Image: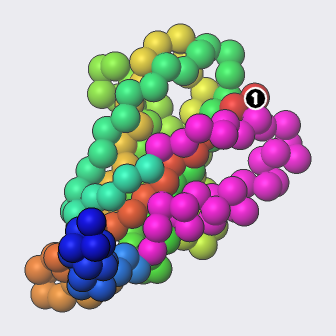
Amino acid sequence: MARVGAIVSAFVMWAPLAEGTDDEAHAAIMEAVAGHVEDGFTIREEYWKGELESGGKKLIRHQLFRGNEYWFWVASSIPGCDVKLEVYDANGASVTLERSEKGRVRGVRVTPAQTSSFYILVQISRAPGEQSGKPAVQLIDWALVYGYR
């Protein structure tokens, strides 16, 4: 048993440390959206999170309801990342009506014309340390939150 502990300790000591976490990204979003709560938006406690390579994309399918207004916000804890966010309908047409940017947080507003599945695209198009068009070898954390009214 002591041998397993020593191996785990050695691994932890040599494991590379992450520069940021998706929890930090989530906290940045929650701080940035306070004004929307005052405007009557309900912010969902559940949220999406993950890591992407520089240049990576994540497509999330989510049901939206006609008659509601939605804001989606995305952020990374790593400063300098170019994080993009877009919402598409089932035909691939953008349904984004408005965009916002507050520090590291990007947001888009959507008011669906019909109840249906929509597709939220998160894209990290560059990361700190990229030079001469060569992507940095690095996973970039992200978090995505939404609210509705």
Residue 116 image position (x, y, % from top left): 46, 13
Residue 108 in the image, given as x and y percentages of width and height? 55, 46
Instruction: Name the residue located 72 percent from the left edge and 62 percent from the top edge.
Output: 31
Residue at point 42%, 18% (across, down): 117
Q: Residue furthest front?
A: 1
Q: Closer to the camera, 138 or 72?
A: 138
Q: Which kind of residue does numbered mark 1 sit on?
A: Arg
In what quadrant of the picture does the N terminus appear? bottom left
Quadrant location of residue 119?
top left
Left or right position of 70 against 57: right
Q: Is residue 51 above or below residue 146?
A: below
Q: Callout 1: helix, strand or loop?
A: loop
User: Alpha-carbon neighbours of circle 1 within 10 Å: few (<14), some, or many (≥20)?
Assistant: some
Residue 28 location (% of width, % of height): 63, 65
Q: Is residue 47 magenta?
A: yes
Residue 145 visible in the snapshot:
yes
Horizontal side of 79 relative to 108 (left or right) equals left
Above or below for 94 versus 100: above
Give the position of the C terminus as an image quadrant. Answer: top right
Q: Is residue 20 above or below residue 48?
A: below
Task: Name the residue beneath numbered marker 1.
Answer: 149
Query: In the image, is 31 to the left or to the right of 86?
Result: right
* In the image: residue 9, left or right of residue 65: left
Q: Residue at x 53, y 11 (%)?
A: 115
Q: Is residue 33 magenta?
A: yes
State the image coordinates of residue 143 (x, y, percent, origin top left).
48, 54
User: In this orientation, does residue 125 appear?
Assistant: no
Q: What segment carries the magenta color?
A: 20-48
Examine the image and state in which quarter residue 60 appears: top left
Across the whole image, how many numbered discs are drawn on residues?
A: 1
